[in-house]
Image (cartoon, grey):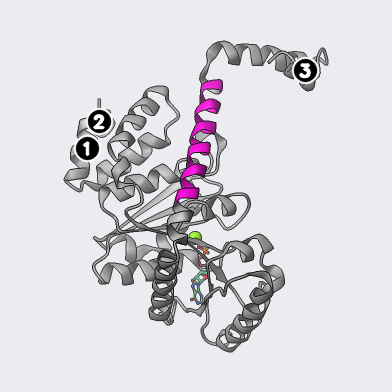
Amino acid sequence: MNSLRRELSVQEILDGFKNKDRNILSRAISLIESEAEKDQKKAEEVLSHFLSFDGKSNRIGITGVPGAGKSTFINQYGEMLCQSGKQVAVLTIDPSSTISGGSILGDKTRMNDLSQNSGAYIRPSPSLGYLGGVAARTRETILLCEAFGFDTVIIESVGVGQSEHELSTMVDAYVMLALSGSGDDLQGIKRGILESADLIIFHKADGDNKNRAKLASQEMASALQILRKEPVPICLVSSTERTGFGTFEDTLNDWLKQQTDNGKFKARRLQQKIIWLEKAIEQKILYQFRSDKVTQAKLQNIKDEVLREKTHPLQVLKLI
Ligand SMILES: Nc1nc2c(ncn2[C@@H]2O[C@H](COP(=O)(O)OP(=O)(O)O)[C@@H](O)[C@H]2O)c(=O)[nH]1
Ligand SMILES: [Mg+2]
C-alpha cells in the first residue's frame, strides 16, 4: 500500500503533533471528517487526548457575501499576524465543492501569500459530506489546530445560508465584511448578521469607494444604535491597498479585552460548549441511525411503500 495512504495510528498522530508535522495535522483533520466507522472511533480517541487544549486560541469568524473580499482580507490579516510572530490557522468552509472541487482553488489563490508563510496553515473544509451537515466538524478541527499550537484560528464562512449562524456559535469574535456602494449597504445586509456581528468592517475602502465606505459606515453606526444594546465597532479596510489593518487589529484586541474583563468572553465560550455538546450528540445519533444496516434496510422498505403509495411518511412515525 502507498505509504501516504497507510492509516496512521493514534500514537503516530500524537507524535506528529509533538513534532509539528503539518502533514499529520491535515491527515488528522481528514480523519475527523471521515464518516467511516473505524475512523470515527479513532477520531474520538485522538480528540480525547487533546481536550486540555480546547480554547487555547483566539477564534475569529469572517463573514460577508461571496465577493466581499473575505479570502483577500484573511490573506493580508494572516500575514500581519504571522509577522508579529503568531501562528495562524485558516479554515475555509466551502459551500459547494468537495476538497478537490472548484471554488476552493479560488480561495487558495487569493491566499497565495499566506499559504507560503511558514507560520500559517490553510485548510479548506467541505461543507457537504459529513452527514450532509454544514462543516459539521469545524469545532473539532479548531480543537486540532489548537492542540497543534496555533494561537489564532480564522474561519472564513461561505457567506450564505444556515452556516452563518453556525459560525457565530463557534468563534470569539464574529467579524462581518460589508461593502458600500454596490447595493450591498444596509438594505442588502441580512438582519441576522447585523444582530450578531461583533465587529463590522467596511471593506474595499479604496479608490472611488473610500468616501462611500466612510458614509456607509456612519449610516451603519446609527442603524446599529437602534438595533443593538452595545456599540459595535466599525472599521474601514482595504486589502488591496493594505490600509486599516492596524486599526482593525487594535479595535479587535480592545474589544476582546473588554469582553474578557466584563466576563462575557468566558460566558460565551461556556455557552458554545453547550451547543457543541448538543451538536455532538445529534451527530452521533444521526450517524448511528445512518450506519445501522438493519435500520437502513427497514427504511428502504418504508421508502418503497411510500413510493407505491401504500403508506404515508407520517404513518410510519407511529412505528418508531
Ligand atoms: N478594490 C478592492 N477589491 C478587493 C479588495 N479585497 C478583495 N477584492 C477583490 O474582490 C474580489 C473577491 O475577493 P475574495 O477575497 O475572493 O472574496 P470572498 O468571496 O469574500 O472570499 C476579488 O476580485 C478581489 O481581488 C479590496 O480591499 N479592494
Ligand atoms: Mg473566499
Disc sitting over residue 10 in the figure:
2
SS assignment at label 1: helix
Mark 3: which amino acid? Val
Mark 2 residue crowding within 10 angstroms, few (<14) / some (14–19) / many (20+): some
Mark 2: which amino acid? Val
- Image quarter where the C terminus lies is top right
Q: Is mark 3 within 8 Å of ligand 2?
A: no
Query: Where is residue 52 shown, x and y percent of the image?
Result: 29, 43
Q: Is the Cβ of the residue at disc 2 closer than 8 Å to that at disc 1?
A: yes
Which range is magenta? 270-289
Query: Where is residue 306 shown, x and y percent of the image?
Result: 77, 17
Q: How many marks are shown on the rendered structure?
A: 3
Query: Where is residue 309 shown, x and y percent of the image?
Result: 83, 16
SS assignment at label 2: helix
Q: Is residue 241 magenta?
A: no
SS assignment at label 3: helix
**CA separation in Å, label 1 and label 3:** 49 Å
Predominant SS along the magenta part: helix
Q: Which residue is mark 3?
A: 306
Q: Which of pointers 3 and 2 indicates the residue nearer the eye?
A: 2
Q: Is residue 319 left or right of residue 108?
A: right
Sequence-wise, the earlier of marks 3 and 2 is 2
Residue beneath the point at 68% across and 63% down: 191
Q: Is residue 228 above or below residue 151?
A: below
Q: Which residue is mark 1?
A: 14
Residue 109 falls in which quadrant of the image? bottom left
**CA separation in Å, label 3 and label 2:** 44 Å
- Image quarter where the N terminus lies is top left
